Image (cartoon, rainbow, N blue to C red):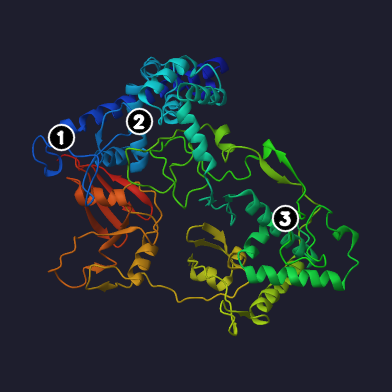
Amino acid sequence: MFEDDLDALPTADLLESAAELRALSHRAEARLLQHALSYADRYHPSAHPDRAGRRPGRRPGRRTCDGRERTVVLGGDGCPEILEFAIAEFGVMLGISPRVAADYLGQALALRHRFPFLWARVLSGEATPWKACRIVADCKKLSAEAAARVDRRVAGLVDSITPARLEKIIKAARMHVDTDQARAEAAEKARERGVFIGQSNEHGTKTMFIKAAAGAVARNDATLAAIAEALKIFGDTRSIQTRRAEAVGIIADARFTEELLTQARAHRLINPQPDPADTPDATRPDPDVPGRSGTPDPTTAAVRARWSDEDEDLLDDWPDSSDELRPEDEIHPDDPHPRSTDAARPDATDAEPESEQEPSEPESASESESAGPSGPFLHIEPDDGRPMDPAAERALRARLARIKHDAYTNQPHSDSGGSGGVRVRPGQTEVYVHLTDLTLATGSGVLRVEALGPMLAEQLAELVGYGPYTVKPVIDLNDAVSVDAYEIPDRIRERVKLTHPVEVFPFGTQETRRSMDLDHLRPYDPLGPPGQTSTSNLAPLGRYPHRVKTHAHGWNVQRVDDKTLAWSTPHGFRFHVDPTGTHRVPPPSPD
């Protein structure tokens, strides 16, 4: 509309141009939804009776055996089926993962078949497309009849109220039209328990969210408070929240925890006159009360706290990605705390599309900033902590290392049968660190830790903890390792994982894990030459991409070099996947 230099535009014209561009963006989003619908219609089972070599007139079923193609319903009750392998090519052309592509197709189908009033407003430009997708995602579990009733209630409100108010209205409408489903969801939510680890790593700091029985949470809270107080006794002057976070690494080792609390109690008994500033709060557990065990009684060791709605961002560990939509509500152990709208984040582990998938939606920046488990968080009142100087911190680390050494040398425990003493060793954790020879020699620089990301070299000591630890030999990934069998031994699996930290399907999102499928790029032939199972012929793939590569007609892959794979889709589009990501290969120019 305004093609002039922006700096030369009057302010009113600049604002008018911005509004026009926003409207143009919404029209483009609506047009993309129409493209998704047209694509889904072309891959209805009735349109492909001979798909994957099936006999004419025989449709693929809703179940599958040996990984072959099936039909899925992505948008909820009332939406048509779609051939599941068609999802993969749609996703790679949009630059999104298969599960995100499944989500987007499902939302488009749900708008047309379950929310016709809302869909009409999207097409006319009266409703923002991403808000409409959010509504259909929230209502996916509703029956077609209940969804239609919600459609009539909220279609006219999409762009007239704030997203937060709209979410509340949608929730109320869902409860009103399907009370039984609302009760079932409430009961399911009440049964949710688990320990969830955030995927992102912020300068060596990660997030953990625990949802467990109230008594178990209280006992862990009391023990964390006792450890934090013990650290203070031994010279840790940092704030209580910092000490409680430090306690998380200590409580993972039961022997270390017991020895630390025991020595802290003994220290207090020998030094009964602490500095006034070091006097613990009366409401905090005191580990040196005579007769009290190493772990304080949570009924008397209550931590002073208050509830605050402003603390909902304490556990916000999810990235804001409004450009990708999520397909299914399947929870993975690596995901952060699951909510109905957050369980299928675009950075979450991919899984093959299922007919039961629940799509999610893009979020505004303000909403993502407060993302997290619903409800207020327990807020611990801060104390007057102060940073530790390097000398004091080294002294504290040395003291804690001695305490841990004492825990495993001075007090051997008896085994379960009571016959003699046994040496208990701490649980083992394997950490892969990638660093240059310069960083190794100087002790400074940036390194990469598997599953955590980049860290400063000086943070490695904090990651390792107080020992003991074992440094394993460096694995030379240039070595070609192979075996004469179909089964993959651990030494080859480990090398493939380190060579390809992420699955090698175009725009794949899964980080390579020990349990991930390793695909033979050249199919294994029992009568073929030796060494077919090798580091050069294996590549990590999630289960759905693995099935697509193996059973979907028209997909091909070949290795370009040690770290690059070339993929081609059924319609001839080509992509290269290498350590820098996925890159579309332009078609050859005509002569």
The Cα–Cα distance between marks 3 and 2, rounded to whole angstroms, is 46 Å
Could you tell me which residue is drawn at 65 percent across and 65 percent down?
250
Q: Residue furthest front?
A: 417
Type of the residue with mark 3? Pro
The quarter of the picture where the N terminus appears is top left
Q: Distance between the Cα atoms at labels 1 and 3?
A: 64 Å
What x and y, as percent, mark residue 85? 24, 42
Q: Compute the Cα span from label 2 to label 1.
A: 22 Å
Q: Decide if residue 96 is in sight here.
A: no
Q: Would residue 42 be visible to someone looking at this image?
A: yes
Provide the secondary structure element on which disc 1 rests. loop
Read off the residue under disc 2. Answer: 76
Disc on the earlier residue, 2 or 1: 1
Residue 48's label in the rendered image is 1
- Find the residue positioned furthest to the bottom: 420
Q: Which residue is mark 3?
A: 298
Q: Is residue 465 left or right of residue 434?
A: right
Instruction: Decide: is 232 above or below 566.
Output: below
